[in-house]
Image: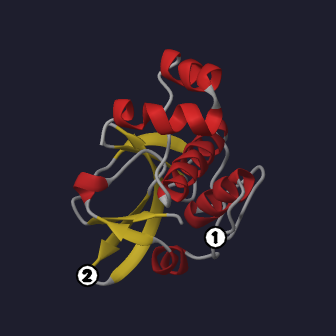
């Protein structure tokens, strides 16, 4: 159904002024259950912005911020600041996400690098084939192109 089909019920439920305002600003009404996807997108965007704000922070094995990070420490910290608790390790984070295809990936999804069934690195998808991550000792949090085809994607729920 289109939004126009809902106008009469909108008028009776929210009043003519509210419905017209909604139409004028191009608002959308979410179907039941859709709010969880919308809140997941907001959560992911917040986490992505937190990770980006940590650009240049040094890598330190086992660190979870706020000034130094390892890879899963950056994702844990970013989602925690966005309001969602993640497990500590890369494998635990992979196990706790909803696994999605590369064609379904969105900004803010987690990108897991793997060798066979072993997940060994994680970053936050930034769009255009890039991730924010904390790569390795001697490096810093940075935006980088995904360099491998051996990746899986997970959406934080």
Q: Closer to the camera, 150 or 41?
A: 41
Give the residue pinned by disc 2. 116
Residue at disc 1, secondary structure: loop
Give the colour scheme of this rendering: secondary structure
Give the residue pinned by disc 1. 86
Residue 89 visible in the snapshot = yes
Q: CA distance from mark 1 to mark 2?
A: 23 Å
Instruction: State the image coordinates of residue 69 (x, y, percent, origin top left).
Output: 66, 57
Query: Which residue: 46% across, 33% down?
Result: 8
Q: Closer to the camera, 123 or 2?
A: 2
Considering the image in quadrants, where does the N terminus appear?
Answer: top left
Query: Which residue: 68% across, 70% down?
Result: 62
Q: Is residue 155 above or below residue 114?
A: above
Furthest toward the top, the residue is 24
Q: In front: mark 1 or mark 2?
A: 1
Q: Is residue 21 above or below residue 48?
A: above
Considering the image in quadrants, where does the C terminus appear?
Answer: bottom right
Q: Closer to the camera, 8 or 32?
A: 8
Furthest toward the right, the residue is 66
């Amino acid at each position: 159904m289109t939004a126009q089909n809902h106008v009469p019920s909108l008028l009776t439920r929210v009043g003519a002024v509210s419905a017209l305002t909604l139409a004028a600003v191009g608002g959308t009404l979410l179907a039941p259950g859709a709010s969880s996807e919308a809140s997941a997108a907001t959560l992911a965007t917040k986490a992505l912005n937190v990770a980006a704000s940590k650009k240049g922070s040094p890598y330190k094995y086992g660190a979870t911020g706020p000034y130094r990070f390892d890879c899963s420490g950056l994702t844990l910290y970013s989602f925690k600041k966005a309001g969602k608790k993640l497990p500590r390790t890369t494998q635990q984070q992979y196990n706790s996400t909803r696994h999605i295809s590369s064609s379904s990936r969105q900004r803010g999804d987690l990108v897991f690098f793997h060798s066979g069934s072993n997940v060994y690195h994680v970053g936050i998808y930034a769009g255009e084939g890039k991730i924010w991550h904390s790569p390795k000792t001697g490096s810093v949090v940075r935006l980088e192109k995904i360099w491998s085809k051996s990746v899986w994607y997970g959406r934080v729920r």
